[in-house]
Structures are given as structure tokens and as C-alpha cells.
Amino acid sequence: MLPDPSPKSNYTHYLEGGGEMGQLIRDYDWSKTAIGAPEQWSQSLLTTISLIISSRFPMFLWWGDELLQFYNDAYRKSLGNDGKHPAALGQCGADCWPEIWPTVQPMIDQALAGGAATWCEDILLPIFRNNQIENVYWTFSFSKVKDAPGKTGGVLVICSETTEKVNADQKMEKTLAELADRESKIRYMLQDAPVSIAMFTGYNFIIESANKQALKEWGKGEEVIGKPLVHVSPELNGQPFLKLLKDVMDTGIPYYGNEVRGLLKQQYKLEEFYANFVYQPMKDENGKTKSILMVANVITEQVAARKKVEQAEEMLRLSIESANVGTWRLDIESNTFIASPRMKELFGYSAEEEVTLADTLNQVHEDYRQQVADAIIKSIASGKDFSVEHPVLGRDHQNIRWVRALGRIYSMEAGHPAHFSGMMLDITEQKQDEIRKNDFIGMVSHELKTPLTSLNGYLQLMMLKLKEPNGDFMASCLKKANVQVKKMSSMINGFLNLSRLESGKIHLNMEHFDLGQLIRETIEETNPTLHQHTISLNTCAEITVHADRDKIGSVVSNLLSNAVKYSPKGKKIEVNCQVTDLAAQISIRDEGMGIKPQSLEKLFERFFRVETKHTENISGFGIGLYLCSEILEHHKGKIWVESEVGVGSTFHFSLPRGT
């Protein structure tokens, strides 16, 4: 029980020093309330009010039967800023706080009945303030206050608004819950992530954690957690990974690996793998690296697939280069034209020059230009394959080349626009062969027709003169007919030899014979056909060789025939023989027109003929010297020529001596 000081009239000193609320209490018209004017208040009430208003801790007092209100400055801020606090002073608690009264009345009644003090912490008591009902949290105690003489006079409330704290706590709890949920999701995501994730700690690289993908790639189970990496996978010794991890620990700088090759033991054998990965240092508060986070994506299949594509592309590139093929690409949308160096070369441009489609068309022979342009347009429009052969006039050298162009239109794909592309082959040699072949057929027809016509004429004369007694004429006709038959036989044998050479089926009937004798016989057979040339044979001793007599005879006959054809009338042809220990050498010299130096290199090529105004009317197929060269090569012999324009030519060939 509080002391009951006197006199009661000296109540003001109890309320002095009570701040603004002390002044309000002194000025309040208490005469209109149930407890009356302050002069009538008991010493217990005055003492309690004095304690309340002088306290810096929020306090509240309900007094008397109507529970009139007293409170201090520390409590006033909990009443809000709507001007309610002065009005709340002296009011009946039930009238002032109807919103909370059902909750607090049982605690008030308990205190007034003499029960134990009530303690509540962070309890929600929504109150009307700031012109609205607000959720307010309180920590408070309700305890009785006695009036003299020992009667309970009121309820002292020591309270503190904890709304901010509770809200902060709730926000923190919510945040922690969200973080926990997020961490749980992240852990779940990391565990089931399609990339390998692991944490290594310390310089022993202890495996602190590893997700499912990492364990799968390692071929290990959960038992590796907590063990050093090198003990789990000793095959890493000598590979770059352990050193890279140490470098990251030392420097604190992340390492990014791209398509790094490695070996891991899988089911008792080493398997090759490729991976993109990062070693990310994890540092403490002092900036020192304690652990390393590994995030790795194994791309072995992708690398293998790419290498197959690269290998195929390289093989294609090598094939194109070895075939000496030109390639091109025309972007349909932008009309951009890209030509390979070989393609540019075929049209007479240098590899460094920019070339358009129009530039290439300009170099197509004018007789074929429109045909080529139409074929390109048709292929692009229809999607059908592009295939055309045409001559090209080189821009730099003005030489005619024949090319075969093959291509097609390729539709638009992801990341690739529609384009028209293909390749171009140089078919000049094949085209010339074709032209020669056509000429060859024509010349064969002509050449075979001539001896046949002569032979037919001689035979008809023989039939007419058969009954005449003049045997000399008959003998002459038969001799000339025999010469024509031999010409035809020689010509046909030449064609057969050419066919056999090109099919690789030429057969040599090797025997020992006197080369000098063969030369003399060939000259004797040739002389009857000569009218304005003479052939002289210098001394030619017996020369034994091991060779095919008929084919060497055709070589001598061909060289003699050429000497006659390419020498002016009345000129002399000389045949010489030389013998060494190893070979026999035959030379046939004429006094003909001679051969230009630029033609000498191609003289022994198939179908090559020296083309000048002097040779226009000289028949031939361009196979004679080619056959001579091939026959001698099969005998391990040689053939060559010395020539001077306007002076003449000397053809030499040699054969190994017979043993």
C-alpha cells in the first residue's frame, strides 16, 4: 500500500516536473469526473500519478470504478497523431478504447480482483488511431494499485509498443523463410542441373560437394564426398587440371577452360572427354581463397561430331584442291557472289580481285553467254540442277578454256540464307581430245579412203590387162598395190597400238635381231613410194638388240615417213647408226622446215601436231610420235629431237644392246 501523505491540499507538488502530461493533469477539469477534484484525491493516487508522469518508460493508469485514464509523455506517442491523446486523459477506458476492451477487460478484472499481475509480450491489440484501426503490437503488464486503506484503487499498465520490432521480426522471418525456400530450390536445381557442379576446399582439393551430374561424369557415388580429388581420380596426375586448381588457389583468379581434353577412368579403363569449365575461387572475409567452385559442361559428343564435320570438310577441301576445281556461292537475297581463287583463275582474274557474277559472265564466250545466263535463272527458279559446258575467254591472257559448271539452289535454313552454289572444272584437255577425236575420225576416213581408192584402181587395171601379154605393167601394178596395202596395214597397226597403250594391254614379242638389217629393210620398203626425196644410210654395222622387231620397225618407218612429209621436194634424208657398249642409237636427219622451241616440249604428246601454214595440207593424226615414244619407253629406250627452224630436224632414238 502506498503512503498517504498530508495535507491533501498540497497535491500540486506531486504533479510538478511531470512534463507536458503533468501540466495537462494539473489543468484538467477533474471536478466533472467520478474521482472529483485533485484536492480530494488520495495520497496513493497522487503518489502513483507522480511516479507515472516522471517515468521515461511508457506507463498507463486506469483508476476508480470507472477506470479513468492517466498516462505519461512516454506513452503519448502510442496514441497516434490524430489529437486523441489530450482527449483520452480522464476518459473512461471502456469509452475511449471500445476496440480493445473485450480483450483487456478480463485482465483488468483479474488485477482489480487482487489476482497476480498479467504479463503479455508482443501481443496484437488493434487500436483506433490516426483515423483508422491499426494493427499495434504491445508488450505490457497489468498490476493492481491500492488506495488507502488497502483497497484496490486501479490498474497500473507498464507498456511498450513493439509494432516496429514485431514487423521487423516478421519481415526477417519472412525473408529467412524466402531465403530458405530459395536456397532449397537452388540446391534442388544445382543437384539436378545438367552441368557438373562441385566444390573443392584447400590445397588437397577436398570434395566438399558434388551434384548428380558431376558424380555421373566421374563415374563415382556419394562416397567421394570429403575425400581429396587426387585420391578419388588418381589418373588426373600428369593432366592439367590439378595444376590449374592450384593456380586458382594461389592467385584467386578464375580460370575458364574451353574444349579442354582430359582422361577419366570409367569402368576400369581410361575414357577421353572434352569439357568447357570454370574454376571460380571462393574467398573468405579477408579475400583469401579457401575453396574453388567448379562448373563444367562435358561436350565430348559435340566435339566428336564437330571434328567429323571438320574432317569431312577438310577431305572435301583437299579433294577440291587435288581436283583443281573452282567453287562459287551466290547469296540469293543480297546477290553477293563469292568465287574461290581457282574459279577466278579460270576466268583470268587474280586471287585478290573482287569478282561479281556479271564479271564471270562477261568472260563466257559470246556464243554461249546467253545460254549460261538462262541456265542459271532456270536452275534458281526451278530448283533443278545446273549443268552446262562452255568456253571461257581468259581476261588476262585471252586464251580459250573449256569449263563444266555444276551447281544447284539451296533453300534457306536456320541461320543460312538461300544460295546458289557449285563447282567448275577445267575440261579443256578433254574437250580438245574430243575435238581431236572427231578430227581423227574424219582423217581416218580420208586416209583409209585414199589407199583403198588407189588399190581399187590398180586392181581394176590388172583385171583389164590380165589378158595382155605385157607382164611388166602387171608387175608394176601389183607392186604399187602391195605398197598401198602395207600403208593400210601400218595405219591400222598404229591405231591398234594406240588402243592397247591406252588400255595398258600392249604386248611385246621380244627377240634378238639385227637392228641394222631392220633399218635397211625399212628404207627399201619406203623408197618405192618416194618420187622427189632420197634416203641415204651411212655405214651401219651389225647391231644386235633384244626387242619387238615389228614395233621397232614401226618406229623407224614412222620417223622416215615424217622426214619425208615435212621436207621440201628434192631434199635429202640421212640415217646414221652409232653403237656404244650399252646402247644402239639411230638418228634420222631431214632438211625440212624445222620445229619451233615452244612446240618441242609437246611434240611426243598424244594428238599433238605442229600447226603452221606449212602443215595445213599435210595429213596426220598426231599419234605417230606419241606411239614411238611409248614403244621406246616400254623397251627402256629413249627418243629426242634436235631442230632449227628453216634448217631441219634430227630425231634420235636409242635401244639397250642385246645380251
Image (cartoon, rainbow, N blue to C red):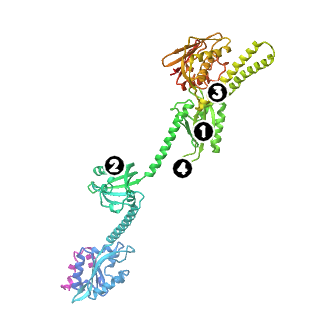
Residue picked out by circle 1: 406
Look at discs 3 and 1 and give the one toward the viewer. 3
Residue picked out by circle 2: 239
Look at discs 1 and 2 and give the one toward the viewer. 2
**Residue 463 included in the magenta stretch of the image:** no
Say what secondary structure mark 4 lies in: loop
**Residue 124 % position (x, y):** 35, 77
Q: Which mark is residue 495?
A: 3
**Along the polypeptide, which appears first: circle 1 or circle 2?**
2
Give the amino acid at mark 3. Answer: Phe
**Along the polypeptide, which appears first: circle 4 or circle 2?**
2
**Along the polypeptide, which appears first: circle 2 or circle 3?**
2
Give the amino acid at mark 4. Answer: Ala
> Can you say whether 85 is above or below 634 in the image?
below
* Marks 3 and 1 in Cβ contact (< 8 Å): no
Say what secondary structure mark 1 lies in: strand
